[in-house]
Image (cartoon, rainbow, N blue to C red):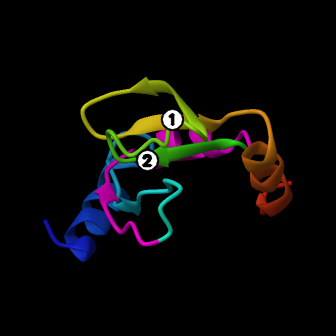
Amino acid sequence: MSGWRIKASNDRLGTDRAVEEFVCECSDGTCRQVIMPTRLEYESVRAHGARFAIALNHENPELDQVLEQNERFATSEKLPGPGMRRAFAMDPRG
């Protein structure tokens, strides 16, 4: 489904139920894998500065721990240390 069709569908259904396209937020800066959380799921993940929505199996065990996953994406959290400090420092939400 193209991006504009997904957005149009989301607008009709409401943002809490329809999935949207997001780019994986794993630690690989070149990753462009598309993930499909709902906007509500994404906002819930990103409400915590060290948590990210990533594609399945994109975690780096040296930097991340997977907190939960479903068939569309995983929620990872940076492990304590430099990665977590950087995540909080770069968090545009706070």
Which of the pair 8/24 is nearer the observer? 24
Residue at 57% over, 45% down: 52
Residue at 86% over, 54% down: 94
Q: Is residue 69 left or right of residue 5?
A: right
Residue 45, magenta (yes or no): yes
The residue that mark 2 highlights is 54
Local packing at callout 2 (Cα closer than 10 Å; few below 14, some 14-19, many 20+) is many
Q: Position of residue 45 (x, y in %)?
A: 58, 39
Three-letter code, disc 2:
Ile
Q: Is residue 81 left or right of residue 31?
A: right
Residue at 35% over, 69% down: 32
Three-letter code, disc 1:
Pro
Residue at 32% over, 50% down: 36
Which mark, by number, is residue 61?
Answer: 1
Q: Is residue 54 left or right of residue 55?
A: right
Q: Position of residue 53 (x, y in %)?
A: 49, 46
Q: Which residues are magenta?
A: 30-49
Local packing at callout 1 (Cα closer than 10 Å; few below 14, some 14-19, many 20+) is few
Which image quarter holds the N terminus? bottom left
Whichever of labels 2 and 1 marks the residue nearer the N terminus, that label is 2
Which of the pair 94/11 is nearer the observer? 94
Q: What is the CA distance from the residue labelled 2 to the residue labelled 1?
A: 13 Å
